[in-house]
Image: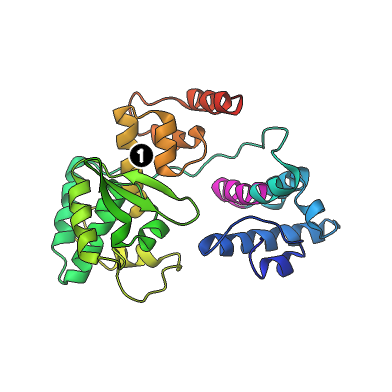
């Protein structure tokens, strides 16, 4: 169903969408914006009207003209998922929006510096949580919210490879890259059934839960800061460099379309260009 409260806020009829946690709150915000656009445009507030694909496109192209292209794309993705429950798949390609630029991946020396800085934190709690960011970010490409939800029992060895079972809006199983696997497994073993990152009671749904922690870490002012965005970019770029098949890379990163990898590919020499990624998406749609 639509998020509780979102149905009333948007004036929409209940729709199955399976959202929870941060996904519900994001959908609430998107729906409120869509309803305001519809009201200003003199449109009925029913789901059948507001979730029409043409209305969604008008909202994203004109109603959000002052928002970042990546934000407009995110809003449209949320609304398309809801519209699909009524009308099925859209019959034509959506207006393309440029994605936000990908963070720069960490170099080998920068990664060594991050690990050294994490291990130098004054308390055990800070050390383990800082290392969890590195191991699960560069090693498994987790997003901040996904890291916040990982428990020790979500990390396991499978066939000689350490994997992370990611929960939340984009559930998946991610093989942890190379040397990061054993150290993440050791960290998870110490957490047991508790959370790996910042264990104990905490507002894990807070959008800056991970970023705020990283900003308070002791570090050399001249050194790169620890960032989950750059850690995830490092994971994705490592796989692009290694030539991981696109289908496999999309599955382990939780990315829906290969074309979305183009913003990371610009950091990798020899990575597939945007046209190739777009063609791969079209070939999959034709199957």
Residue 194 magenta-drawn? no
Relative image position of residue 268 (x, y in whole percent): 34, 31
Residue sitting at x 21%, y 70%? 125
Relative image position of residue 199 (x, y in whole percent): 29, 70
Q: Tell me where residue 176 sits by quadrant.
A: top left
Q: Is residue 104 visible?
A: no
Q: Secondary structure at mark 1?
A: helix
Magenta residues (range): 67-80
Q: Nearer the viewer, residue 84 or 75?
A: 84
Residue 78 magenta-drawn? yes
Instruction: Using the image, determine if residue 129 lies above or below residue 57.
Output: below
Q: Nearer the viewer, residue 134 or 250?
A: 250
Which residue is disc 1 drawn over? Answer: 236
Relative image position of residue 282 (x, y in whole percent): 58, 26
Q: Tell me where residue 241 sits by quadrant.
A: top left
Magenta region, main secondary structure: helix
Relative image position of residue 75 (x, y in whole percent): 62, 51
Residue sitting at x 71%, y 66%? 7
Residue sitting at x 78%, y 53%? 50
Residue at the extreme front of the image, as rendered: 159
Instruction: Report whether 45 appears left or right of 82.
Output: right
Q: Is residue 241 visible?
A: yes
Instruction: Using the image, determine if residue 136 lies above or below residue 215.
Output: above
Label 1: how many residues lie within 10 Å, few (<14), some (14-19) or many (20+)? many
Residue sitting at x 25%, y 64%? 129
Tally of numbered tags: 1
Instruction: Report whether 168 appears left or right of 223.
Output: right
Instruction: Using the image, determine if residue 144 lies above or below residue 286.
Output: below
Q: How is the image coloured?
A: rainbow
Quarter of the image with the N terminus in it: bottom right
């Amino acid at each position: 169903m639509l998020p509780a409260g979102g149905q009333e806020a948007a004036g929409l009829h209940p729709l199955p969408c399976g959202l929870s946690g941060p996904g519900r709150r994001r959908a609430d915000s998107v729906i409120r914006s869509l309803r305001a656009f519809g009201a200003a445009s003199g449109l009925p507030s029913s789901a059948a009207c507001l979730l029409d694909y043409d209305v969604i496109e008008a909202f994203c192209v004109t109603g959000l003209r002052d928002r970042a292209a990546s934000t407009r794309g995110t809003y449209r993705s949320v609304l398309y998922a809801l519209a699909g429950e009524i009308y099925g798949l859209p019959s034509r390609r959506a207006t393309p929006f440029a994605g936000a630029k990908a963070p720069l991946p960490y170099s080998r020396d920068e990664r060594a510096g991050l690990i050294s800085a994490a291990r130098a934190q004054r308390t055990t709690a800070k050390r383990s949580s800082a290392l969890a960011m590195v191991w699960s970010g560069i090693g498994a490409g987790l997003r901040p919210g996904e890291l916040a939800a990982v428990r020790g029992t979500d990390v396991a060895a499978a066939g000689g490879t350490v994997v992370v079972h990611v929960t939340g809006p984009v559930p998946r199983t991610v093989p942890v890259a190379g040397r990061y696997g054993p150290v993440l497994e050791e960290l998870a073993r110490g957490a047991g059934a508790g959370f790996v990152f910042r264990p104990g009671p905490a507002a894990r749904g807070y959008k800056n839960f991970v970023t705020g922690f990283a900003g308070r870490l002791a570090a050399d002012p001249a050194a790169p800061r620890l960032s989950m965005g750059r850690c995830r970019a490092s994971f994705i770029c490592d796989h692009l460099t290694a030539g991981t098949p696109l289908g496999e890379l999309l599955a382990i990163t939780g990315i829906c379309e290969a074309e979305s990898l183009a913003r990371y590919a610009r950091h990798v020499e020899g990575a597939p260009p945007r046209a190739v990624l777009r063609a791969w998406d079209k070939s999959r749609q034709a199957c």
